[in-house]
Image (tube, rainbow, N blue to C red):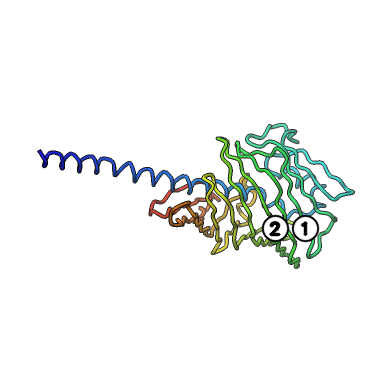
Amino acid sequence: MKRIITYVSLLVLFACQPDVNRDLQINQSFEGEEAYWASKSLDEHLYLVFQPWALFDEESFLDSLPGCPEISRDTAAFSVTLNYDRPGCTEVPVGRKGSITLEYGRESPTEGDTLRLTFTDYEREGTAVVGQRVFRFTELLSGEITVAELTNSLRLLHPEGSSTRLKPAYLHRATMESNKLIELSSQRQMQGRNWSGNAFEVLVDPQKLQSSACLSESLPRPASGTETWTIHRTGGNPVTHELVYTTSDACESRTTIRLDEGVDMEKTP
């Protein structure tokens, strides 16, 4: 009788073990998905930071903007608003709502000046961006612009209702040619709090690089680089996930999410 009880107990133990593993895998998968989602959301509108104020008065440039927003300029405040609720083209864009306002402060920023991106009811494919992104021009060279991101609190709202808080302290560098952005890189660190309420840190090393050939895509994504996400779980040891970026000849960006437990997930773009 004892042997039967022991056998049944072991059977129950091993039957339950895969469920524990699946739960762990699901949790880490959620963390990897969140990292990918947050990174993609930050990259989406970064190219706007390096567009000169005067360029928003050129029709050819406005026609090239993804989502073809309606543009309004405030020449007194040197600000420009991109309104995606009233698109400036006949084909209604899919996935974007609300507006983004760029506040330059002056026509031609100098070193030390700031640029603010303010999001008003802005959404892309159901993801809402709440708050501001703040950038300081740290270096303005011929053909190269460097900005330090000073964003204190940005919130991303998932369509299902969860949210992620981000505090990026990245350094972004752009290579320009005749006022045209031809290469964009990002590096350094970010802090935040995830869907589960756990704090995390992100290290970008090596730098994320968006190449000139792919910057015209509707959703620009890195061609190379690595993000390391360290998540501090309550009551447990930190876990570390990596986002590794590669791209094909056709500008199809691929993200490999390497979870702490050893599982890889592939994402495009």
Residue under circle 1?
114
Evaluate if marks 1 and 2 touch, with contact meaning CB atoms under 8 Å apart: yes
Most foreground residue, 89 or 189: 189
In the rendering, at what x and y percent does residue 194 appear?
Answer: 54, 48
Give the image quarter of residue 120. top right
Residue that numbered label 2 is attached to? 150
* Residue type of the residue flagged with mark 1: Thr
For the point 68% across and 54% down, the residue is 152
Q: At numbered mark 1, what does the secondary structure look like: helix, strand or loop?
A: strand
User: Which of the labelled discs sits on residue 96, or is there none?
Assistant: none
Q: Position of residue 244 (x, y in %)?
A: 49, 56
Looking at the image, is mark 1 or mark 2 earlier in the sequence? Answer: 1
Q: Is residue 187 left or right of residue 85?
A: left
Could you classify mark 1 by the number of other residues whose Cα lies within 10 Å: few (under 14), some (14-19), or many (20 or more)? many
The residue located at (64%, 45%) in the rendering is 155
The amino acid type found where label 2 is placed reads Leu
Circle 2: element type = loop
The Cα atoms of the two marked residues, 1 and 2, are separated by 9 Å
Percent from the top left, x then y, of residue 238? 46, 57
Q: Bin the neighbour count of mark 2 within 10 Å (Cα to Cα): few under 14, some 14-19, many 20 and up.
A: some
